[in-house]
Structure formats: C-alpha cells, structure tokens
Image (cartoon, coloured by chain):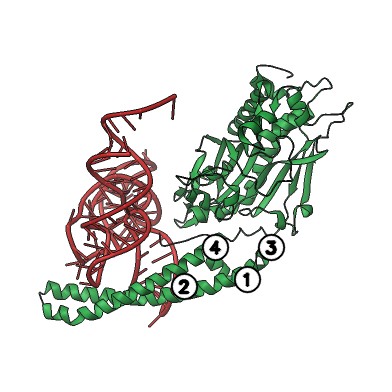
Chain colours: A green, B red
Amino acid sequence: MEVVNLLDIKLIRNETDRIKELLRRRKFSMEKIDRILEIDEESRKIKTELNSMRAERNSISKEIAKYKAAKDENGVAEILNHAKEIANEIKIKEAKLSEIKKDVEDMLLDIPNLPYEKVPVGKDETENVEIRRWGEPRKFDFEPKAHWELGPKRGLLDFERASKLSGSRFTVLYKDAAQLERALISFMIDLHTSKHGYTEVMPPHLVTRQTMINTGKLPKFEEESYSTKIDDLFLIPTAEVPLSALHTDEILKEKELPLKYVAYTPCYRREAGSYGKDVRGMIRQHQFDKVELVMYTTPESSYEALESLTHEAEEVLQYLELPYRVIELCTGDLGFVASRTYDIEVWLPSYNFYKEISSCSNVTDYQARRANIRYRKSDNTLDFVHTLNGSGLAVGRTLVAILENYQKKNGKIEVPKVLRPYMGGKEEI
RNA sequence: GGAGAGAUGGCCGAGUGGUCGAAGGCGCUUGCCUGCUAAGCAAGUGUAGGAUUUUCCUACCGUGGGUUCAAAUCCCACUCUCUCCGCCA
C-alpha cells in the first residue's frame, strides 16, 4: 500500500499550532513535531520530482511502443538511450524516497493520539478529576482482611506455589475462588450481550507484530509485551488488541455501525518498571482475566458512545453492589492511544481507597488509521471509523473486590446475589 | 512438515510484456418508465497523492525484491487461503 495513514500528517502540516498545543498537554516533545514537518517537506519535494520523472519515462515508453508497432527500429534506437538514463535516475530517486518515507513513518508511529479538547490539563495521575461516586464503602464491625491474607488462609488463593511455577506476580486459584472467577466472566458477558447488545467474541490470544502496531501497542511498548521468539507473535495485553484490529483493512457499511463486541480473554503484561507497585496479592499480575468491550462508531457519535460504554461497565459493579467512583484522566495520565478516558475505581478495604478496575477510552480514529478501518458514508465517500474500548470489567480485581468487601468475621465470603445462579446457588463460600 | 492450486475493484470474475486502472457480470447511485412492488431502459460508479484543478499527471492487481525503455502479466523470496498427505488436542 502506498498510503501510510497513522496520525494524519496533513493535519500536523495544516494545523501545526493546534496539534502542538494538544500534544504539549500530554508532554510530547515539540522538537519531534518540528523534525517530522521538516522530513515530510523533503519527502514531498522528492515525490513531486519523482512524479514528473515518471511522467516523462512513461511518455517515452509510449513512443517506443508506437515505433515498435510501426516496426520502426531506428526510431526506437534513437530514444532508447534517453529512456535508460531516466530509468536510472528514477531508481536512485526512489531509493532516497523510500528511506525518507521510512523515517516519517517511524516518527509518526511514535506520536500519541491527540487529547480531546475538554480533557482536563494536568501533569500526572494526581490531577485526574473525580466525576461521580456510587455506593457507600461498607463499615466493618471487625478488622477486614486483605485478600492476600484471607485468600491463602481459606485455601482459595495460592501465591507461593504460583511463584514456584511462574515467578512473581502470578496466582493459583482453587475451588470456590476458581469457580467465582468463572462465574464473574459468565455474568459479565451475559449482561453485556443480553442487556447492552454486544456480540460475544472469542479472539486469538496471540497476534502478529503488525496487529500490535495497528492497535498502537507497538513500537512504543515492546518492553511491556510478551512475545514468542521464533514466530514473532505477541501475547495480547488486552482483548482490545484483537477486537480493535478485527476489521483491519475493511470497509464497513454505515448502517452496521455501531459495532459492539465483548470478549473474555486472559491478558498478559510484563509490568516492567512497576516493581514497587501493588506487590502484594493479585492486584497487579503478569496474567489476568478481563472482559473487554470494544465499539466501532462513526466519528460524530464516538464521545457519546464513550459515555454509554462507561455506564455499561459501571453497571457490572452496580449489580455486584460494589461501591465505586468514576474519574476522568487528565492529559498527563492519558494512555498512548486514548483521546479521552474514564477510569472506574472499585472500593478496596485493603487499600482503604478506590482502585482501578476499568478504563474506558475513546480512541477516535487513531487505531482505525493504523489498521485502515473505514466506513462508507451515505454520500458514498470513505472515512475512518472511531474505536472505543473499556474493561467490563477486570475479572481478577473484581474477584478481589468481592473477597474483601463481602467477607464475614468468620472468614467466609458472601456471594453477591447476581452471581449465585453461576455458583450452583451457593450463598457463601 | 511434504505435494499441488490459488491471491485482481464493494463482490464474482477475465486478463501471460506496451493502446490495462484493468473486459464482463452482480451490487450501488442517479434519471426514465410503470397504480404499488418487481422487472425493464439509460448514464455513472476504486483508493490515495500531486498540479497550471470543469482537465491532466503519478502510484496502487497478496507483500517485498529483481529483469526491462515499459510488468497485473516474466524471475526470486515471503505471507496467507484452499485441496491432499503426515502429525495432533
């Protein structure tokens, strides 16, 4: 394909000041922008030159064709040398262009999505903004245990054997905990398919390098990814990757939008550089289960869709009767591909605070450009779709929230009402 | 892993060196026609970039190289799909 979409280079070219301001808010380097513009300028110059050289070559070729047709070998000989010269020059020029195009592409791959204009400007997570709260944290009449104490004590969670098997940041679940994990997955998927109209998907857990690039996970986050050495496949860090890349290189019909997909998959993350964080328990793992929501929408409706997607994720916690709050991430805390993000945080007694359990983002056309996912509009023209994703929810952390919030003095755990049908009717475990 | 066949526009499918951005069909859009629907008739209908922008130029026929003045077409490598064999939950 001749075209490299990525972040629209034309947009950077035509609205340099606005783009710079938006990227400055998320601490992106201004020198990099200037450098891209410089190289882009050069690449376009070469392209124009190449364009006219090719035009000349093509017209000579046509003349040769005419002479050949007229069996005029003298006429051919006369211009053949000139044709060879041009062909040679073109070859040199082409080599130069492909080199420069590679540079531009590499640099564009490194630019994050533009934040939505209304995202609060801030330097890091301390400047995120709380939007709303739901439910009241429970008042315990005994000292509640953290899941990393309660779990092993009850024979439900096993961190020691997990580290024997796999090293740090893994957990083995037994018996009712394992069943509860399964129950949560089923409950979440059933809710999203039957009530919210999502289509259930079981995607591959290994994807190609290109799929990772298309969804914005590479080249930036190579050190965060698990990959297979021989085949260069990547273990998905989230089902967002296969779901958002599902329609790569496709042209969708406007009337089939919005597309809504829900998938349960394990997620694999190296968690490089998070050594001091969440070291106890199963909050931060190299492998965790997640039910993921992904939407494809028209550009006009994506921010509205973000609101509904977030509410659909929140509903899981409402059914489970777990207190939570919703915060909006400030520009400095926004993920690489996101233009606007709401995090849902569940109440955890062990942290005595709210802890992230879902992150819902509007990715706008950022992944759609990389993956070349377009739709045909009613006026027959093409445009990129917008993609959105959100956890609905992180299953492991939901399990933790249930263990901690529903624990009783005797160490038993009440099963939330909506999960009982999935737990063989058990009321406590 | 072995052997063979294939990859062309929204879809099907023709095309083995120059007049091919690509026949034909389907679909779609517009107009005509017809109580409605269907059928019929006519025209239009890929993407992207560029220019002196009612026109012209360039690139794109799985991907990447090569041969040639000229490649969908010839050569090489790779990827994927299908069929058969092997292996296997």
Q: CA distance from mark 1 to mark 3?
A: 12 Å
Observer-nearest of A46 and A121: A46
For the residues bearing labels 1 and 2, Cβ distance under 8 angstroms? no
Query: Is residue A237 at all visible to an observer of this figure?
Result: yes
Q: Quarter-wise, where is residue A67 in the image?
A: bottom left
* Mark 2 surroundings within 10 Å by alpha-carbon count, few (fewer than 14), some (14 through 19), many (20 or more): some
Q: Is residue A329 left or right of residue A108?
A: right
Residue at image position (45%, 45%) is: A230
Q: Quadrant of the N terminus of chain A?
A: bottom left
* Mark 1 surroundings within 10 Å by alpha-carbon count, few (fewer than 14), some (14 through 19), many (20 or more): few
Residue lying at the far left of the rendered structure: A71
Instruction: Classify mark 4: helix, strand or loop.
Output: helix
Residue at label 1? A31
Q: Position of residue A412 (x, y in %)?
A: 78, 20
Q: CA distance from mark 4 to mark 1?
A: 13 Å
Residue at image position (64%, 23%) is: A179
Residue at label 3? A27
Q: Earlier in the sequence, mark 4 or mark 3?
A: 3
Residue at label 4? A108
